Amino acid sequence: MSELSLRRLVAGVLLPGFVGERPPGWLLSAVEDGLAGVVYFGANVASPAQVAELSARLRGARADLLIAVDEEGGDVTRLHVDTGSDLPGNAALGAVDDEAVTSAVAASLGRELRLAGVDVNLAPCVDVNCDPANPVIGVRSFGAAPELVGRHGAAFVRGLQDAGVAACAKHYPGHGNTRFDSHLAQPVVDAPAATLRARELPPFAALVRAGVRCVLTAHVRFPALDGALPATLSPTLIGLLRTELGFDGVVLTDALDMHAITRTVGLADGAVAALAAGADLLCLGNPSNEPGRGDGEVELGVVWDAVLDAVRDGRLPLDRLTEAASRVRALASWTSAARRTPLPPAPPPGFGRDVARRAIEVTGSVRLTSRPEILDLRQHVNRAAGRNSAALGGELARRAPAGPDAGTVVLVDEPQRDEGLRSELRAILAGRPDAVVVATGWPDPSVDLGRNVVRTFGNALANAEAAADVIFGGAR
């Protein structure tokens, strides 16, 4: 194989991020040289029209380019990073527990992504969130029961892929029982193999049966299944996905710029090890995550060269690279065909808010007839979601009746993760026992939120609108 052909083959397994609302020259050159695709983050988004124009410019450089985004709905949104998503996320969908609704929400997402020129969505998250103190999954999960997560994950896949967008099940084999965030460290799930097979794996098996096109690996270690390596770098765990679960689509790595990789094996060696382990497509991550990282060009070059060197010196067999690139091309063929299918119909006005309203749980007396003082105690920032959306505080302030303040609304996310927050909440409730507490995060029944509580199961715009309906009256 010529050097040029080998270079193009390596390009065909790379999925970088970049900085800016327009494609930089180095990225367009890489696309012309065979780059598999690109992944959008919030820093690439200004408006729906701008994203559609960006996609058209990139795909003009090569028609079969994969364009991916992390658009879960709910708390994790890239297309609505400034306003919050108008669709609820997984925890709200699990609380509603209507698979037709989950499919409809996914189809609505698919329609929006199609209009933006995106054809691969890094969703759904099918981690079983069995630890209420999990720092990175939480309301991104459908629930704490494998059966429920599998049903709704499969429904989401059907809705999204019927709309013409490839789905990606994550984070294989499960990030739901971790106390560390793999953006910051390498988590370990130290559970027996029988527990992992009964709890973590069934949702992924359900999504494979549903025909999911991609599976994204977790940078998490599972000593009972592989004593040494995180799933992204583990031939054992990727082999289990292929053989026992029967998955034959694209295995995509979680972002390789996360500290679970960069502060252990390193970006370059991690990329080579992931391919050698059986991954097909390397997500390089979000260069705007940390100051001073540049716009993504250097990281793309580092990984490109590392994989080339590994093939040349035999550490990465050529047939493994060829297999990976072939799977990615098959995905691109599917997405190219899907772009020619009809768009699903637009959802009715208020669709997301109405679904979010069905998810809300109310305890006590939460209806207010005068303007309250709003105390926002939310401190936790989920690295996957980014900063807390301002939608809830803004919506409550906008909808509050005119007149002097009377009463209190306290906003919390996941107080189970922070004793300081719990202490502050206890102090407020001691002085204002009639305060209404709006909890947007994952529920933990062991935490006392007072007598008047609204649980939203998410922090998106849709959840905010639904919470305001409940507190001040409004659409049902």
Image: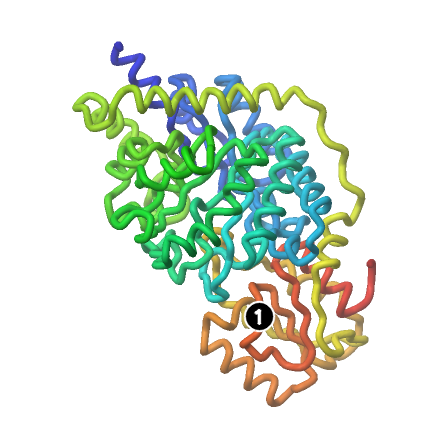
- SS of the residue under disc 1: strand
| Residue at the left extreme of this rendering | 313
Q: Residue at x 60, y 64 (%)?
A: 440
Horizontal placement of 165 versus 99: left or right?
left
Q: Residue at x 57, y 47 (%)?
A: 150
Q: Residues within 10 Å of mark 1 (few under 14, many from 20)?
A: many
The relative height of residue 151 versus residue 324 in the rendered view (above or below) is below
Question: On the rendered image, what quadrant is the N terminus found in?
Answer: top left
| Residue at the top extreme of this rendering | 2
**Label 1 belongs to which residue?**
412
Horizontal placement of 252 versus 83: left or right?
left
| Residue at the bottom extreme of this rendering | 431
Percent x, y for residue 23? 47, 29
When asked about the image quadrant of residue 398, the answer is bottom right
The relative height of residue 212 versus residue 328 in the rendered view (above or below) is below
Question: On the rendered image, what quadrant is the C terminus found in?
Answer: bottom right
* Nearer to me, 276 or 67: 276
* Nearer to me, 275 or 417: 275
The relative height of residue 256 versus residue 435 in the rendered view (above or below) is above
